[in-house]
Image (cartoon, grey):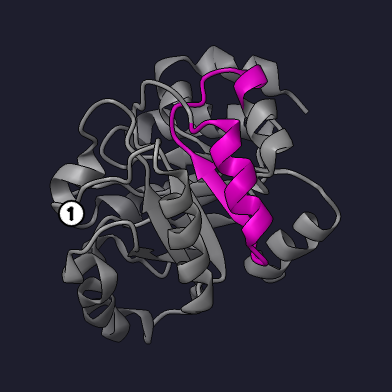
Amino acid sequence: MSSIYQNIITSSLKSKKLLAVLIDPDKMSLENAASFISKVNSSVATQIFVGGSEVDEGITEALVIEIKRYTNLPVILFPGDVIQITDKADGILFLSLISGRNPDYLIGKHVEAVSKLKSTNLEIISTGYILIENGKQTSVERVSQTKPIKRSTIQTIVDTAKAGELLGAKLIYLEAGSGATHPIEPEIIAKVKKELDVPLIVGGGIRSSSELESAYKAGADLVVIGTAFEDNEDFFNELKK
């Protein structure tokens, strides 16, 4: 398989928008994986992300193995903890929660992960992860014990994203959180994108094709949708190839 990151870069340069379907191992049973992935394959999705904030050990690997039985799309780990790392996937977003100040999620968990990552062939993609408040506490906020950045402080969001890039992040990820009441505003996406020289990922709260298009038009290179598909698989019908 060609480099996952290089594909994202090439797509960004060509203004080809990407869509990742996020699957939480804690919410997807192995029995339902085949039918769900069939719908993913029929959609415009270009990647599959697998991960969650609170997942028991071994569950992620079992689900990744099952997913890869039914798709040729790249399967990328979106881990909430070191125990979710598995060499059965194709790549991993090496997330640093740069919106927070908990050292465990800035560097601590990453140090723990190194010995596991060294024994895999995963493509490791350094990603600056920024949690944006959405009106309620998310699982990321609860588990990481960090506060999201307020939507009203746009310059802080922009500066945090740029700082992540300058520190070496290959991707910047703006996240409203699982089950967000509303997506990140186009104004925020546009201002962050204007300052970046690396691709921008946006996720959280997107529940319609119009909201998806709005994120793309504002500058998102890759949009991540999870809860919307969990709550309503018919959403896939709006995103047919």
Quarter of the picture holding the N terminus: bottom right
For the record, the magenta segment spans: 184-211
Asked whether, in this view, residue 147 is left or right of residue 228, the answer is: left
Find residue 2 and report its image quarter: bottom right
- The quarter of the image holding the C terminus is top right
Q: Position of residue 174 (x, y in %)?
A: 47, 47
Q: Residue at x 27, y 70 (%)?
A: 106
Q: Residues within 10 Å of mark 1 (few under 14, many from 20)?
A: some
Inspect this view and state whether residue 126 appears: no
Residue 195 figure quarter: bottom right
Total marks in image? 1
Q: Secondary structure at mark 1?
A: helix
As drawn, which residue projects farthest toward the right? 14
- Residue 127 within the segment the image draws in magenta: no
- The x, y position of residue 113, in whole percent, is 27, 77
Classify residue 176 as left or right of residue 101: right
Q: Which residue is mark 1?
A: 144
The type of residue carrying mark 1 is Ser
Q: Depth check: 194 or 102 in front?
A: 194
**Vertical arrangement, residue 56 with respect to residue 213, above or below:** below
142 is higher (above) or lower (below) than 96: above
Query: Does residue 210 show up magenta in the picture?
Result: yes
- Between 19 and 150, the one lying in front of the other is 150
Q: Position of residue 181 (x, y in %)?
A: 36, 21
Q: Position of residue 133 (x, y in %)?
A: 32, 36
Q: Residue at x 21, y 39 (%)?
A: 139
Q: Nearer the viewer, residue 63 or 111?
A: 111
The residue at 22%/72% (across/down) is: 109
In screen coordinates, is 122 left or right of 9?
left
Would you say residue 63 is visible in this rendering? yes
| Residue positioned 33% across, 56% down in the render | 99
